[in-house]
Image (cartoon, helix red, strand yellow):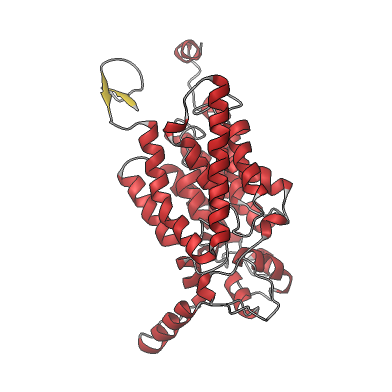
Amino acid sequence: MELSASGGAAGAPHLHEGSTTASMMWTVTLCLVPSGLWGIWQFGFPALFVVSVSIGAALLGELSMGLILRRPVLQDGSAFLTGLLVGYLMPPGAPLYAPLAASLFAVVVVKWSFGGLGGNWMNPALGGVIFALLSWRVALESWIAPRAWHGELAGSGAAVLSPVAFVAASIKRAGRVGPVGLLAQGHYPVSAVSGAVAQWLGAHAGIRFDPHYLDLFLGLVPGSIGEISAPLLLLGAVVLFHRRIIRWLAPVAYLAAFLLLCWGFGGLPLGRALFQGDPLFYLLSGGILLGAFYLAVDPVTSPRSPAGVLAYGAGAGALTFLFRLYGDLPAAMPFGIVLMNMLVPAIDRMGRPLGPEAREAAR
């Protein structure tokens, strides 16, 4: 990354920040490893197979395109990161052809259709996941009970659903309760850890809360492989902020728009009044943290100006809210971010001055 002495992107002399594409890609990958290991620990070998196939397919696609175009590309780490993210956004019970096809589509079609790294027209990982979701929707609702449940569903015949899927299936019998109330009414399992913590705090500190919240926060619920652990995702984000690999504008705008809308209008589908939504439930489920800190911040598919980034982030958060609470899509976050990715050229054009300098620079 190069910055001019005056802060611009062009002109000499140049000050070198010391970051390279490869170092940034591998740093993001390392920051994501803990949350993936947590998902693999909770869901076992099926999750490991899904992530491995996803990464392998992305590397294969990248290698093939590099050989065809005679460009060495594997070393920059972007294909590995794309495959990792595709795997993280898959349910652990997904058939292996889904991550295989999703990663190949992400790399070969989304990334390379306009020239490879730096020319992709949407986030490649999200593009691949959307391709799989639209192709095999039912197959990508294959949830696995986490290790933390200790076989609580064994012999019950109950289907394993993610909290998002469970609430969506129960919304017709909401009875003016919130999403966590629906989990409690439906006897959605609670891990022994969260149950014990909630009981102890209630008895000794007078603090009462639904243990489902703690399960959602810690990642002790069914879900996509790399999205369930909020602490590990946030820890990785802190490292990325510290290393200045990501900036705060897009995540804050995305989360602010999403959470404000969830609070203001999220209760309406459940028969509640305005401003009776439950933003905490929606924040801790559905891959929102993964989307905010690792996917919405892709510099290639984000606007260039600060105002544009704010508009982009807020738009992605608003679309995620609409798809999540009022749509019929299997996942909301990928669609919300990708739609705003495709609007980035228009946002950049709207932010440009219309004088002769801008016209000359555009030539």
* Residue sitting at x 57%, y 31%: 111
**From the image, which quarter does the N terminus lie in?**
top left
Q: Position of residue 252 (x, y in %)?
A: 44, 49
Q: Nearer the viewer, residue 217 or 63?
A: 63
* Residue sitting at x 50%, y 67%: 216
Q: Nearer the viewer, residue 43 or 171?
A: 43
Outermost residue to the bottom: 203
- Does residue 246 show up? no
* Residue sitting at x 58%, y 43%: 126
User: To which quarter of the image does residue 112 belong?
Assistant: top right
Residue 363 drawn above or below residue 329: above
* Residue sitting at x 45%, y 58%: 37
Residue 356 drawn above or below residue 349: above
Residue 286 drawn above or below residue 13: below
Left-right relation of 95 to 341:
right
Q: Nearer the viewer, residue 257 or 29?
A: 29
Q: Position of residue 46 (x, y in %)?
A: 58, 59
Q: Nearer the viewer, residue 277 or 30?
A: 30
Q: How many marks?
A: 0
- Does residue 197 show up? yes
Q: Position of residue 247 (x, y in %)?
A: 38, 41
Q: Position of residue 155 (x, y in %)?
A: 67, 81
